[in-house]
């Protein structure tokens, strides 16, 4: 019983093939064509597994680009998929923090991968992967360097979470001679504070897992733990939670 989940995000596309308890994955940039990114991710995944499309029992698409995938059997929201994928990665998860390229979400589950409640920021880029990319560019750094650069630095106050105003604020702080490391730490704290406020409104608790592309940023994770007053966990596979959850849901459909 082989299933596939494809999570087409605004920045990266993730695909997971689930075969029993074993699974493999592919990550690639989404680029300008979500449909093409999803198709190529599926082809690469099948090629690596030595399988053909006919060998796959069910495919679920998720993420913002899910509606553009003509080859899937069903489309499911990323909220549902991240909740299920997080539970598969870490049993007993009650709260999922998903920060992707263009939105951020806090998802409360029943501890079994089912969504109980959620809050979502999808009206602006504040606190998202895109926000961090813009800030990194303003600082002359790559987004992948932010966590290491800010390690141990005392955060400076970043007053605005609007991407345009925050970029101007960062440029102004640099002109004042404020260390780049302190600015990055301040950005991480601002992102974490925004997410923590969303979580507080929901009344989250239990085990907290950080998913999505920004989960690779240890600086954001550390400040999330500080702002929420509780350990926030992440795993090497956290970025794949949406695609993995989609593959798990596809298997559940086949089992019905």
Image: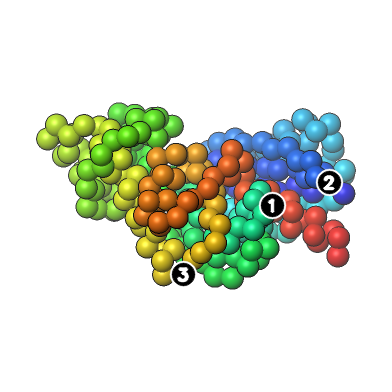
**Tag 3 secondary structure:** loop
Q: Nearer the viewer, residue 251 or 102?
A: 251
Upstream in the sequence, badge 3 or badge 2?
2
Which residue matches tag 1?
88
Q: Tell me, what colour scheme is on the image? A: rainbow
Q: Earlier in the sequence, mark 1 or mark 2?
A: 2
Residue under numbered circle 3: 203
State the separation of the CA atoms marked 3 and 1: 23 Å
Q: Residue 135: name its quadrant.
A: top left
Is residue 196 depicted above or below 128 in this figure? below
Identify the element where label 1 is drawn.
helix
Q: Position of residue 41 (x, y in %)?
A: 67, 38
Instruction: Please name the residue shown 59% across and 70% down the image.
Output: 116
First reached walking from the N terminus: tag 3 or tag 1: 1
Q: Residue at x 62, y 53 (%)?
A: 86
Residues at circles 3 and 1 in contact by the CB criterion of under 8 Å: no
| Quadrant housing residue 52 | top right
Q: Is residue 87 left or right of residue 191?
A: right
Measured as percent of width and height from the top left, residue 201 is found at 41, 70
Residue 134 appears left or right of 156: right
* Percent x, y of residue 203: 46, 69
Query: Which residue is tagged 2?
Result: 20
Within 10 Å of disc 1 (Cα), the crowding (few <14, some 14-19, many 20+) is: some
| Residue 62, visible in the rendered structure | no
132 lies above or below 194 = above
For residue 252, side relative to residue 183 (left or right): right
Where is residue 77? Give x, y as percent: 61, 61
């Amino acid at each position: 019983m082989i299933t596939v989940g494809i999570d087409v995000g605004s920045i990266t596309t993730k695909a997971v093939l689930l075969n029993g308890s074993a699974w493999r994955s592919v990550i690639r940039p989404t680029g300008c064509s979500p449909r093409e990114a999803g198709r190529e991710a599926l082809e690469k995944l099948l090629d690596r597994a030595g399988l053909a499309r006919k060998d796959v029992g069910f495919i679920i698409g998720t993420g913002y680009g899910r509606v553009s995938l003509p080859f899937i059997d069903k489309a499911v929201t990323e909220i549902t998929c991240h909740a299920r994928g997080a539970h598969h990665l870490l049993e007993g998860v009650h709260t999922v923090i998903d920060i992707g390229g263009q939105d951020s979400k806090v998802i409360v589950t029943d501890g079994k991968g089912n969504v109980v409640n959620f809050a979502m920021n999808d009206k602006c880029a504040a606190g998202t992967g895109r926000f961090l990319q813009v800030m990194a560019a303003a600082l002359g750094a790559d987004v992948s360097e932010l966590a290491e650069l800010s390690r141990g630095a005392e955060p400076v106050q970043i007053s605005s979470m609007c991407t345009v105003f925050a970029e101007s604020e960062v440029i102004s702080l640099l002109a004042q001679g404020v260390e780049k490391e302190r600015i990055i730490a301040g950005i991480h704290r601002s992102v974490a504070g925004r997410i923590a406020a969303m979580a507080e409104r929901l009344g989250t608790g239990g085990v907290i897992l950080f998913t999505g592309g920004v989960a690779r940023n240890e600086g954001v994770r550390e400040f999330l733990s500080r702002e929420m007053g509780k350990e926030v966990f992440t795993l090497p596979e956290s970025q794949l939670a949406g695609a993995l959850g989609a593959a798990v849901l596809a298997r559940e459909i086949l089992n019905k």
